[in-house]
Amino acid sequence: METVILAVVIAVVVLGAISGLVVSGRKKKQLPPPPPATTKPSVTAPPAEPQVGEEAETPRDEERRTIEEVELPAAEAPAAEAEAPVAEPEAPAAPAVEVPEPTAGRLVRLRARLARSQNTLGKGLLTLLSREHLDEDTWEEIEDTLLTADVGVAPTQELVERLRERVKVLGTRTPEELRRLLREELLALIGTDTDRTVHTANGIGNGGDEIPGVVLVVGVNGTGKTTTTGKLARVLVADGKSVVLGAADTFRAAAADQLQTWGERVGARTVRGPEGGDPASIAFDAVKEGIAESADVVLIDTAGRLHTKTGLMDELGKVKRVVEKHGPVGEVLLVLDATTGQNGLVQARVFAEVVDITGVVLTKLDGTAKGGIIIAVQRELGVPVKLVGLGEGPDDLAPFEPEAFVDALID
């Protein structure tokens, strides 16, 4: 009996132990208890959206007014800015009209520039002529000096022969005597009795009425033709003449603007047309305007053209013929770059065949030691050099004066 009771007790104990293990295992699998109230949640919940009417105030009892009792709000005064009139943009001021330097003695004032550029020619000749013995080698050096200065073959030979004869007759050769001798011979070669005035006198038109003097300016691309036309306008204005400019160079984009700027500076009107338009038509209109305004001179700037292009050269002839429907052209000036030397003579020949050149303008004479081109051009064309350009300034175009030029060479 005791054995049975003992077995029952052991069974109960074993069963109780097993039950405790099971309960303990189940407790381990349960979720941990919630954190205490003081612990903040890891993720903040979004605030609840406000509902309609939550922020509305409690309606208050107010005294109601009829529509007749309600006053309309007073009209606000307009802003001060609105009352003030809007200021209109100012028109651009007209460019101030300049007063060009007088042309009288202008070349004398620019003589220093000539002396610097032509020093090789004048000083070189005086140095060679001052040698104690003028043998054949010395005379050859004198010839080379003249040819290098682009005097030309024929004029050089003439000058050397005359110098030889006069030196023999002279005998003694002091520096003063040589300078006087060389001055006389150079002046004889250049010519002092030639008419070098730019003819701008009024002419008689085909209808019998008086028309302005017409000057046609021609030349190759790059010679400074448009700039020369503008500077010539200043020369004429300085001499008291009224000028109308014709921008017949329609092939170069900025030519008309450039010429108009030159004209505005001295109060000269510019007649222009559309880019790429007919140059002859613009030249015709320029003379027409000149007649209407009773101007003294009409300057026509033509398009620069290569002397090798036959079509362009023929068009230049057309411009002259169309202008002559009004009346005669008083002057046809050929602009040549003095730095081109003998190549300028080739250009001059072709232009002279198309239009009757009456005078030559040599530009950039201060930038070359080839001043002898003046002699060569005159000999080749049979027309005088009338104007020379001696710098980039607006008043650096001067009437050519042989005496001042030769003095600048040998002084």
Image (cartoon, rainbow, N blue to C red):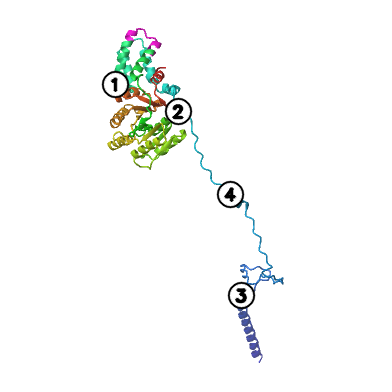
Look at mark 4 in the image and give the residue it sits on.
Answer: 85
Q: Earlier in the sequence, mark 3 or mark 4?
A: 3
Residue in the picture at 37% in, 15% down = 183
Q: Which dot marks residue 153? A: 1
C-beta proximity under 8 Å, tags 3 and 4? no
Q: Quadrant of residue 161?
A: top left
The circle on residue 238 is 2
User: In the rendering, at what x and y percent does residue 186 appear?
Assistant: 35, 17
Between residue 168 and residue 73, name the one nearer to us.
73
Quadrant that contains the C terminus: top left
- Comes first in the chain, label 2 or label 3: 3
- Residue reaching furthest front? 208
Q: Element type at marker 4?
A: loop
Q: Is residue 77 magenta?
A: no
Q: Amino acid at mark 3?
A: Leu
Left or right of 272 on screen, residue 52? right
Label 2: how many residues lie within 10 Å, few (<14), some (14-19) or many (20+)? some
N-terminal of the pair, mark 1 or mark 3, is: 3
Asked if marks 2 and 3 touch (Cβ < 8 Å), the reply is no
Residue found at the very far bottom of the displayed protein? 1
Q: Secondary structure at mark 1?
A: helix
Give the magenta-colored segment's residue range.
Answer: 167-179
Task: Name the residue tied to disc 3.
Answer: 31
Mark 2, secondary structure of its residue? helix
Q: Is residue 38 left or right of residue 394?
A: right
Q: CA distance from mark 2 to mark 3?
A: 113 Å
Q: How much space separates mark 1 and mark 4, taking CA atoms?
A: 78 Å
Q: CA distance from mark 2 to mark 4?
A: 45 Å
Residue 143 in sight in this render: yes
**Residue 173 falls left or right of residue 310:** right
